[in-house]
Image: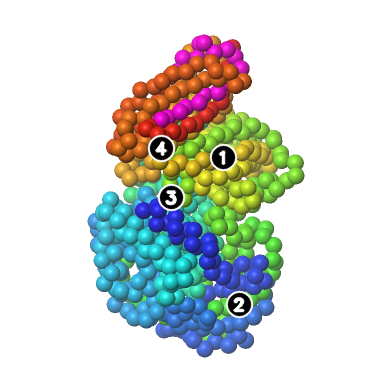
């Protein structure tokens, strides 16, 4: 499945389309706007003199006003003209039935000959169930799969879609492509898939927002106005995701994507009350064990009980869905069991739109939100549009969020600040189509950050953010991940919280090569900032391979992963490995050094052999041959063992792990420090 995407991603970089004209660097902004009459019919004949545009409350010069009929490609752009994405979240049986009914009502309308529809399913990943097509029969078949419980069966159509993208763009790269429309569709889908894979690695709280942003941002270079219909039982947005929610709206507006949130729960008067009660019950259960983890990291669930108690009182699963829709120029379909009128209105939205071009008030990337408003002087008309955008620079590594801007600025400083300690480590594991899968682990002492307290409410609050970049030798960003941490909790738990660390853990996918890892953390209250830099060498791993050697600090219990969840190589069924980030190891308290390695043997090449060699200052200290267990069902060998270190003195040492299998050999090294 991932091999197909690797080819697609590579070709996409070679044949970029012109960026959508929605950013200040182009010296102009292009808005997509719906203008309808009292009967909800598109008005196709507006004159520029009838249109007024304001940005952040200031009137801006209008350069052009042009109507684009639904299903037609904008001037100079290849077909298809209109793209519609049907996205299904996790739905129960009744919701699945309603979602399918809503789609059937939509497909009864003429959506335009040039309109193409794709079907996606959001769950543990973004599955492409049907690439963009005008064949409504294929759309209906895909909807039957996506609006179901058939998650385990979605891998096959997703793999086929990725392969189709790779093959189409491969033809373009070799000069054999003959269908510009097919290339255009493949480009769009390839970008959606690539953004989905990237944002899945950043996903927090399992929120669907990350994959919804991928669907929107992936269509940024496609011409015209695009529609995304999101069928769901509701959309929950905690305060932790507030900035990302705003950025999702911004990226959709910049990509000319309108969301239509369709609540498939139907008309249920007590649904909100049930949601609030469920949230309170969840918080009550978690509060039974609300202390930070002893001796190290703290979990977000435990650190944010106060926030969640407050959120439980205002739990409204539909309001974010309404805001996402209306802020991007669409509308939400809520509390209905009959989808005929909403789908008729939605089809009307697809019948035509205006491209309105204006000069922005500022060309700087300042991370500020810039509201946009279009007024039409003709009487009897109504305007439907996105509400604005956040002025952040475009980036192939994914959308830059507003809270990341000061962090990126801190990395540019000639004298990097080091106001508090950051410890970090990177551990390479399996090979993916795009490169090696690298797990990044960083730790920061919570005591480094400013705390504000509310004695009356008996709450503490602290707020910081962290960002990590992987840059190649030319300074280009290969990966960017970040997290915003608004912590809030009971005041009596603060002393214990401040004894621990926050653990930032992300999976990266990095092609073989030499890189620089850059980490920056910033206290959003005091502006205290620290920058950490370290070289990162990612070796190719073809054939026999071995992971990084992980020195284990401790093992701790972990809940079981949900079926189909992305694998974490640092955890088993019930326990997770907490790696040492080059911590000094005390011989007085540690008799054995726990070491963890994953071996990826060649199939059918016999049993591999492992050798462990210790050295100090180039001088050999010891050598052991290890008998490895049999490979697991996935063909890997996980090796975890405590190795005696009583014979080695204080100082810096190196452990080399060598694996041999027939004529093949792979090795990895790790350095560690022993102290008395």
| Most frequent secondary structure within the magenta stretch | strand
The CA span between labels 3 and 2 is 41 Å
Q: Answer with mark 3 or mark 4, whichever residue precedes in sequence.
A: 3
Above or below, 157 against 633 in this view is below
The CA span between labels 2 and 1 is 46 Å
Q: Answer with mark 4 or mark 1, whichever residue precedes in sequence.
A: 1
The answer to whether residue 72 of the structure is visible from this angle is yes
620 with respect to 289 (left or right): right
Mark 4 or mark 2, whichever is nearer to me: 4
The residue pinned by badge 2 equals: 357
Mark 2 or mark 1, whichever is nearer to me: 1
Residue ID at (40%, 53%): 3
The residue pinned by badge 3 equals: 433
184 with respect to 457 (left or right): left
Report the quarter where the C terminus lies.
top right
Q: Residue furthest right?
A: 414
Measured as percent of width and height from the top left, residue 404 is found at 61, 50
The residue pinned by badge 1 equals: 537
The answer to which of 520 and 62 lies nearer the viewer is: 520
Mark 3 Cα-neighbour bin, 10 Å: few <14, some 14–19, many ≥20: some
Q: Which residues are magenta?
A: 643-660
Above or below, 398 against 43 in this view is above
87 in magenta: no
The residue pinned by badge 4 equals: 544
Q: Answer with mark 2 or mark 1, whichever residue precedes in sequence.
A: 2
* Figure quadrant of residue 91: bottom left
Q: Answer with mark 3 or mark 2, whichever residue precedes in sequence.
A: 2
């Amino acid at each position: 499945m991932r091999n197909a995407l690797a080819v697609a991603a590579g070709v996409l970089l070679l044949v970029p389309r012109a960026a959508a004209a929605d950013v200040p660097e182009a010296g102009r902004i292009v808005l997509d706007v719906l203008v309808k009459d009292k009967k909800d019919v598109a008005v196709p004949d507006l004159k520029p003199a009838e249109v007024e545009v304001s940005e952040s409350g200031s009137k801006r010069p209008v350069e052009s006003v042009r109507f684009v009929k639904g299903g037609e490609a904008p001037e100079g752009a290849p077909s298809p003209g209109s793209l519609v994405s049907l996205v299904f979240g996790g739905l129960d049986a009744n919701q699945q039935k309603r979602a399918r009914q809503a789609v059937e009502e939509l497909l009864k309308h003429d959506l335009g000959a040039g309109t193409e529809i794709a079907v996606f399913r959001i769950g543990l990943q973004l599955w492409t169930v049907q690439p963009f097509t005008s064949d409504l029969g294929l759309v209906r078949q895909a909807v039957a799969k996506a609006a179901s419980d058939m998650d385990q069966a979605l891998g096959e159509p997703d793999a086929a879609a990725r392969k189709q993208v790779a093959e189409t763009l491969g033809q373009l790269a070799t000069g054999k492509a003959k269908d510009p429309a097919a290339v255009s569709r493949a480009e769009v889908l390839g970008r959606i898939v690539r953004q989905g894979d990237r944002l899945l690695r950043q996903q927090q709280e399992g929120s669907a927002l990350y994959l919804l942003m991928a669907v929107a941002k992936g269509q940024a270079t496609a011409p015209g106005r695009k529609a995304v219909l999101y069928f769901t039982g509701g959309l929950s947005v905690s305060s932790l995701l507030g900035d990302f929610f705003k950025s999702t709206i911004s990226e959709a507006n910049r990509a000319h994507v309108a969301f239509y949130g369709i609540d498939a729960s139907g008309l249920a008067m007590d649904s909100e009350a049930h949601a609030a009660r469920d949230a309170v019950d969840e918080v009550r259960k978690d509060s039974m064990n609300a202390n930070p983890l002893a001796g190290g990291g703290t979990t977000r669930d435990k650190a944010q009980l106060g926030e969640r108690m407050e959120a439980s009182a205002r739990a409204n699963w539909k309001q974010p869905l309404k805001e996402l829709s209306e802020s991007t120029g669409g509308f939400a379909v809520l509390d209905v069991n009959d989808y005929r009128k909403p789908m008729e209105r939605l089809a009307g939205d697809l019948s035509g739109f205006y491209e309105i071009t204006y000069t922005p008030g500022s060309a700087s990337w300042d991370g500020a939100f810039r509201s946009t408003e279009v007024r039409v002087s003709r009487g009897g008309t109504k305007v439907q549009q996105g509400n604005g955008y956040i002025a952040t620079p475009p980036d192939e590594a994914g959308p830059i969020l507003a809270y990341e801007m000061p962090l990126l600025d801190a990395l540019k400083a000639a004298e990097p600040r080091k106001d508090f300690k950051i410890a970090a480590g990177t551990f390479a594991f399996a090979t993916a189509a795009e490169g090696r899968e690298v797990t990044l682990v960083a730790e920061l002492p919570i005591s480094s950050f400013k705390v504000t307290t509310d004695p009356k409410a008996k709450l503490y609050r602290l707020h910081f953010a962290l960002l990590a970049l992987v840059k190649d030798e030319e300074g280009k960003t290969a990966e960017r991940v970040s997290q915003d941490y608004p912590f809030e909790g009971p005041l009596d738990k603060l002393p214990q919280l401040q004894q621990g660390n926050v653990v930032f853990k992300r999976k990266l996918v990095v092609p073989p090569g030499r890189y620089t890892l850059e980490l920056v953390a910033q206290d959003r209250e005091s502006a205290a900032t620290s920058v950490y830099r370290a070289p990162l060498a990612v070796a190719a791993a073809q054939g026999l391979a071995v992971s990084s050697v992980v020195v284990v600090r401790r093992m701790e219990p972990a809940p079981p992963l949900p079926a189909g969840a992305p694998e974490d190589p640092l955890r088993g069924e019930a326990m997770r490995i907490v790696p040492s980030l080059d911590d000094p190891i005390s011989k007085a308290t540690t008799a054995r050094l726990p070491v963890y390695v994953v071996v990826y043997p060649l199939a059918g090449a016999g049993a591999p052999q492992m050798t462990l060699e210790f050295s100090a200052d180039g001088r050999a200290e010891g050598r052991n041959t290890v008998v490895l267990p049999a490979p697991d069902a996935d063909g890997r060998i996980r090796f975890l063992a405590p190795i005696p270190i009583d014979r080695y003195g204080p100082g810096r040492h190196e452990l080399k792990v060598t694996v041999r299998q027939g004529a093949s050999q792979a090795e990895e090294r790790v350095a560690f420090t022993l102290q008395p």
